Image (cartoon, grey):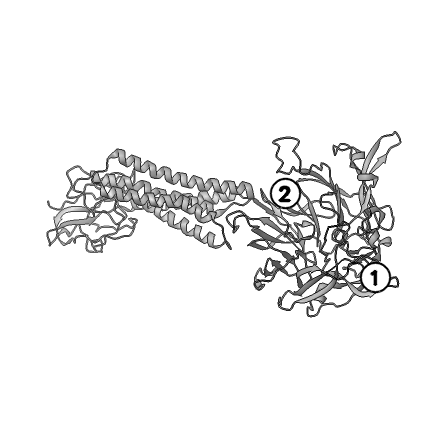
């Protein structure tokens, strides 16, 4: 059959036998055409244009409703088109699915490699979803190649199975992503990309049976003109080569059709990528608002207590933690962190993470604190429980550590790790065994294997605390005085090998038999230690000294401040007041007496001013008694008020509790045993206070739990003992009393 100048069907292929080169148009020189037995592996998205004299009306005559040609190929029966309608579209979609699978597969791998470690669920997820797809696709391809005639029913079944398998795999991963988000507050990006990869893989696996079916229905179908081939598509010209073999010529497409097919190739990756980006943007658990201007870092804590509250705020949360940042109070709720303006209680900056669980730095953190500040208060750190795909093993304490600029709310450090201890200096963070700079986030060093850091919390200005342990010297002095002390090991933040062990550091006093409080409190980079001397009555004497001086940091201030006689450090009062508060001298026979029968503060040391004040003269929070009292009225009724009574017996603060703001009566609100106000000290964790007071720059924060539900059945909704009900807190800001 001779060569005819027929309209050729559109295809993005470029001829791989040189027939498209300028001046070598196969239509104008059919006798010089070369057989294309060697097929290219490039996707059919290229375009070549024949010689202008070949067919000037080619593009205008092309069928574009599906982006495919209706031209007739030489060597076919008259009226039979090649390739069949839909072939080029399906081939383009097949390449598009493969392209999308590669894009999302590489993205998933990169995201996984970005994790420090991941647990077993991750490879299992891939095996359970992508694995069956690949195995099923391979079996289907082998089955189709073995069958000469692909019956429509069989092709339909195979296509349906592969499509259903792919969608099920993608849906399984997507549901796992959603479940992880609801439980942990993490939108796991690699789960979304894995779901997209499974969908992309499904496209070529579903299209392949259809292409094989079309191949089986074609007359005189051979390898070069098989629609199911991955290489460039050719048609039989009807001529013979010099060797007597059938001559093939590449199928051509006009420019407009090529653009259509190219769009189909990139459509799966673009569509799925857009879906991921949209999902990631819309289902974003993080809502982070930084301060428009930095908070005032020049404020100092109130030197005395204001008579009443300046402002009030209400917050709902299962728990509420308040710490002192350099610019004022910083609160941690179920939703996240917020910094308040000490003047009016407005929010300066906030970081919220839906469904997240904020966890204490470690079990060694005194009072299980979930917020840790740097000694200068310019940084605040917290941890969020990590999802199971990062935990290794899945049940471990994997967490993300976040460090914020306390004045602006900007995140200066974020690290995924496996829990461990957490410490802050003024310029560095110790996250488990690794130290990082807070200036640029770079890693400074890693502790040697076998080293163990026990303490979590504020450290020195330029030094870390490696560990502390009980001092096994005599706890009762010859004079019969109880003495609480521990030994600590410190080192400069830039030299972890320069360890210095310090003995006789004041620790929390033990008031209950069988209870060991082997921790201390370090305030603004200062510690308290026994000097080894006694007063005239034989009572142990103590002094304040900076942790940097103990760690022998170059240039550290080695000045010591006498604190007088004491039996230990009041960690609770020290933490809440931002001062080092020592216990008075407590004899062995008085150690177990009720708190109200003994003073719980002797000396107050303010590191910011380097001043020491006797508790009996202190007007701040350090030596105060706090609680709720019943206030009788002249008509016989009564109300309740939150009171703070300073150590110098000045009036302090009285905050009336609005009737109806709590379901408890004034009598029930008052503290047990008729003791309305008790000193600040570390009590049994089971004895939760309805009120807490924290001294911060610019304001004293008083918090009242008006519901006090605790771990009980919720009053409404499903009852679940394992869930803690949200409680309502009233927050009062006391801004007076500035020096």
At horizontal 44% and vertical 44% (from top left) the residue drawn is 274
At horizontal 44% and vertical 40% (from top left) the residue drawn is 172
* Label 2 packing within 10 angstroms: few (<14), some (14-19), many (20+): some
Q: Hey, which quadrant is residue 38 in on the image?
A: bottom left
Of residues 107 and 490, the one nearer the viewer is 490
Observer able to see residue 256? no
Give yes or no for contact between labels 1 and 2 (Cβ–Cβ under 8 Å).
Answer: no
Observer able to see residue 244? yes
Q: Is residue 180 above or below residue 379?
A: above
Q: Where residue 621 appears, x then y in whole percent?
A: 80, 50
Q: Nearer the viewer, mark 1 or mark 2?
A: 1
* Label 1 packing within 10 angstroms: few (<14), some (14-19), many (20+): few
Tell me the quadrant of the picture where the C terminus can be found.
bottom right
Q: Where residue 436 appears, x then y in whole percent?
A: 59, 61
Q: Hey, which quadrant is residue 97 in on the image?
A: top left
Q: Which residue is mark 2?
A: 334
Q: Where residue 353 appears, x then y in whole percent?
A: 59, 45
| Mark 2 secondary-structure assignment | loop
Of residues 8 and 223, the one nearer the viewer is 223
Q: Which residue is mark 1?
A: 478
The Cα atoms of the two marked residues, 1 and 2, are separated by 49 Å
| Mark 1 secondary-structure assignment | loop
Q: Where residue 189 appears, x then y in whole percent?
A: 48, 47
Q: Hey, which quadrant is residue 462 in on the image?
A: bottom right
Q: Which mark is residue 303?
A: none
Of all residues, the one furthest to the bottom in this rendering is: 554
User: Left of 739 or right of it: where is 267?
Assistant: left
Tell me the quadrant of the picture where the N terminus can be found.
top left
Q: Earlier in the sequence, mark 1 or mark 2?
A: 2
User: Left of 270 or right of it: where is 390?
Assistant: right
């Amino acid at each position: 059959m001779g060569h005819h100048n027929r309209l050729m069907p559109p295809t993005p292929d470029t001829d791989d036998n040189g027939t498209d080169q300028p001046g070598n148009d196969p239509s104008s020189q059919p006798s010089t055409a070369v057989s294309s037995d060697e097929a290219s592996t490039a996707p059919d998205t290229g375009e070549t244009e024949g010689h202008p004299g070949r067919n000037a009306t080619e593009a205008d005559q092309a069928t574009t409703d599906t982006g495919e040609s209706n031209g007739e190929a030489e060597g076919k029966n008259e009226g039979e088109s090649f390739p069949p309608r839909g072939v080029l579209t399906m081939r383009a979609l097949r390449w598009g699915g493969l392209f999308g699978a590669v894009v999302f597969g590489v993205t998933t791998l990169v995201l996984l490699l970005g994790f420090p470690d991941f647990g077993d669920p991750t490879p299992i997820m891939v095996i359970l979803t992508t694995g069956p797809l690949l195995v099923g696709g391979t079996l289907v391809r082998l089955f189709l190649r073995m069958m000469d005639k692909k019956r429509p029913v069989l092709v339909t079944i195979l296509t349906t199975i592969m499509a259903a398998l792919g969608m099920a795999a993608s849906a399984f991963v997507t549901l796992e992503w959603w479940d992880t988000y609801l439980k942990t507050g993490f939108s796991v990006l690699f789960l979304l990309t894995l779901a997209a990869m499974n969908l992309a893989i499904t496209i070529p696996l579903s299209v392949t049976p259809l292409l094989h079916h079309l191949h089986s229905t074609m007359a005189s179908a051979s390898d070069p003109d098989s629609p199911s081939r991955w290489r460039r598509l050719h048609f039989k010209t009807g001529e013979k080569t010099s060797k007597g073999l059938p001559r093939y010529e590449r199928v051509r497409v006009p420019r407009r059709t090529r653009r259509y097919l190219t769009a189909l190739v990139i459509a799966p990756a673009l569509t799925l990528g857009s879906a991921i980006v949209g999902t990631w943007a819309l289902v974003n658990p993080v809502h982070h608002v930084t301060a428009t201007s930095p908070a005032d870092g020049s404020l100092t804590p109130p030197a005395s207590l204001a008579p009443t509250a300046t402002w009030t705020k209400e917050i709902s949360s299962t728990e509420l933690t308040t710490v002192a940042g350099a610019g004022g109070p910083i609160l941690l709720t179920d939703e996240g962190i917020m910094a308040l303006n000490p003047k009016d209680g407005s929010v300066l900056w906030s970081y919220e993470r839906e469904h997240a669980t904020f966890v204490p730095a470690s079990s060694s953190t005194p009072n299980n604190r979930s917020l840790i500040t740097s000694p200068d208060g310019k940084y605040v750190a917290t941890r969020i429980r990590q999802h199971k795909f990062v935990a290794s093993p899945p049940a471990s304490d994997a967490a993300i550590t976040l460090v914020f600029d306390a004045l602006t709310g900007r995140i200066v450090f974020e690290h995924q790790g496996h829990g461990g201890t957490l410490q802050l200096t003024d310029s560095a963070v110790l996250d488990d065994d690794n130290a990082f700079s807070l200036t640029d986030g770079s890693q400074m060093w890693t502790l040697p294997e076998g080293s163990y850091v026990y303490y979590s919390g504020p450290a020195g200005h330029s030094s870390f605390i490696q560990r502390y342990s009980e001092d096994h010297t005599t706890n009762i002095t010859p004079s019969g005085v109880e003495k609480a002390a521990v030994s600590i090991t410190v080192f400069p933040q830039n030299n972890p090998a320069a360890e210095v062990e310090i003995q006789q550091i004041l620790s929390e006093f033990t008031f209950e038999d069988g209870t060991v409080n082997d921790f201390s409190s370090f305030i603004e980079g200062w510690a308290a230690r026994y000097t080894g001397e006694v007063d005239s009555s034989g009572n142990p004497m103590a002094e304040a000294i900076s942790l940097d001086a103990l760690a022998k940091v170059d240039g550290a201030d080695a000045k010591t401040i006498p604190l007088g006689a004491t039996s230990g450090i009041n960690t609770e009062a020290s933490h809440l007041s931002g001062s080092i508060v020592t216990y008075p001298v407590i004899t062995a026979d008085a150690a177990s007496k009720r708190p109200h029968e003994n003073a719980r503060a002797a000396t107050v040391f303010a590191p910011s001013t380097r001043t020491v004040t006797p508790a009996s003269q202190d007007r701040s929070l350090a030596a105060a008694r706090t609680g709720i009292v019943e206030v009788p009225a002249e008509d016989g009724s009564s109300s309740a008020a939150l009171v703070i009574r300073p150590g110098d017996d000045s009036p302090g603060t009285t905050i009336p509790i609005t009737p109806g703001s709590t379901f408890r009566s004034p009598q029930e609100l008052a503290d047990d045993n008729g003791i309305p106000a008790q000193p600040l000290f570390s009590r049994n964790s089971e004895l939760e206070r309805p009120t807490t007071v924290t001294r911060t720059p610019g304001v004293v924060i008083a918090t009242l739990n008006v519901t006090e539900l605790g771990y009980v059945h919720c009053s409404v909704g499903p009852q679940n003992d394992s869930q803690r009900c949200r409680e309502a807190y009233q927050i009062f800001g006391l801004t007076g009393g500035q020096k």
